[in-house]
Amino acid sequence: MPGFAVRTIPLAETRVLRQAVLRPHQTVEDVAAHEVPGAVAVGAFDGDELVAVGLVGPDGGPGAWRVRGMATAPAARRRGAGAAVLDGLVRHALEAGATRVWCNARTPARSLYERAGFAVVSDEFELPDIGPHLVMELRAFRGFGAVAFEWFEGLERDNSKEYFTATRERYETDVRGAFEAMLRELGESLGGEPRVFRQHRDLRFSRDRTPYKTRTYGVLAGVPGAAAGLYAELSGRGLYAGTGYHGLARDQLARFRAAVADDAAGADLERRVAAARQAGLEVVGETLRTAPRGFGRDHPRIALLRHGALVAGRRLPGAGGIGREAALEHVAGTWRAAAPLTAWLDEHVGPSAEPGGRRG
């Protein structure tokens, strides 16, 4: 915030201000005794004077960090000192890998936290000798702003090291950082492990010498009931989510065609593909131009038999940005809608047993 210097400081330097503002009924020693191990302190300075402080540290479960001890000197209130400290605390938590930042906010300070993006998640409650409070929280994933998609558009125009270097902070924060935060949050509920792939292209076997991919993509791996992994992708075209078997090894392809040719299993797959399309998913995959060997062109399921891959997904346009709830619902909803199709693939195809063969 303009007018204030914000930096991390030793915990001991925060105690006098915290005691005077927050706990005048206690001593400075009492304040120190209640500090949580691992907490980091941030202070805002007006010249050499410390005018606002706050603490943040891991608390509340995996990925959760708690803001506490927010105190601003009376003379510095309504000048942005508290907001500057809160911004510094949130940044520190997110850089440390937090997926949720929360606090017990004093009810009169509710607007301070709301302006920073926090939301109320509890009824009001009373803390003895302190006053009414609300639990408020900020999720690490806040959606994808318009700047994320503008970054991709710029990369498509100028796919160069100069562009990437000049805009790296935007990429790390608004593109990859936001994308990783989305996958981490989805992984908390679905039980998977996020993996985001590198932005640099492998140029060893490519005639295209542009150094960067024009999409940022990753998977949520290890989700129960989704052997192939759950895929998501961010690009100038928007936010794509999908899952399925993107390529079949020879043994997988043989099992796939045998199952499609089977009257019961094949008809079941047809129903699941139709249901996925009815839910708004696009079902695609590399296909042969003609019938595969051993099958006639008049086979009732020839369209499926031509597939050498089967993926279901959909894209949400990114013009103007994509909000947090819209992004989460789009990705999770796509994966849910595709689940019956991938369950069929897991049951009838499964991972390859060939050396170097694909899982899906």
Image (cartoon, grey):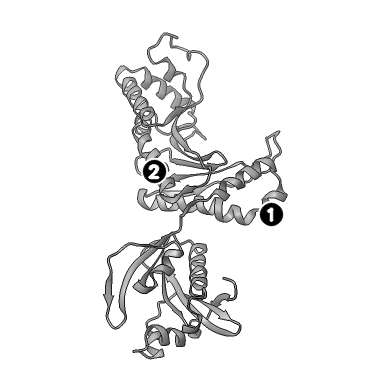
Q: Nearer the viewer, residue 208 or 100?
A: 100
Numbered label attached to residue 229: none
Coordinates of residue 265 in the picture (x, y in percent): 32, 22
**Residue at the spot of label 2:** 332
Picture quadrant of residue 353:
top left
Q: Residues within 10 Å of mark 2 (few under 14, many from 20)?
A: some
Residue 94 pos. (x, y %): 49, 62
Assess disc 1: are there few (<14), some (14-19) or many (≥20) residues with their C-alpha within 10 Å of its C-alpha.
few
Judging by the rendered image, the residue that carries numbered circle 1 is 166
**Image: 50 above or below 344:** below
Q: Position of residue 180 (x, y in %)?
A: 50, 52
Q: Residue at x 48, y 28 (%)?
A: 248
Q: Position of residue 8 (x, y in %)?
A: 54, 76
Which residue lies at the image location 68% right of the left edge and 39% below the top edge? 203
Three-letter amino acid code at disc 1? Ala
Res. 226 in view: no
61 on left or right of 73: left
Location of residue 310 with respect to 148 vertically, above or below? above
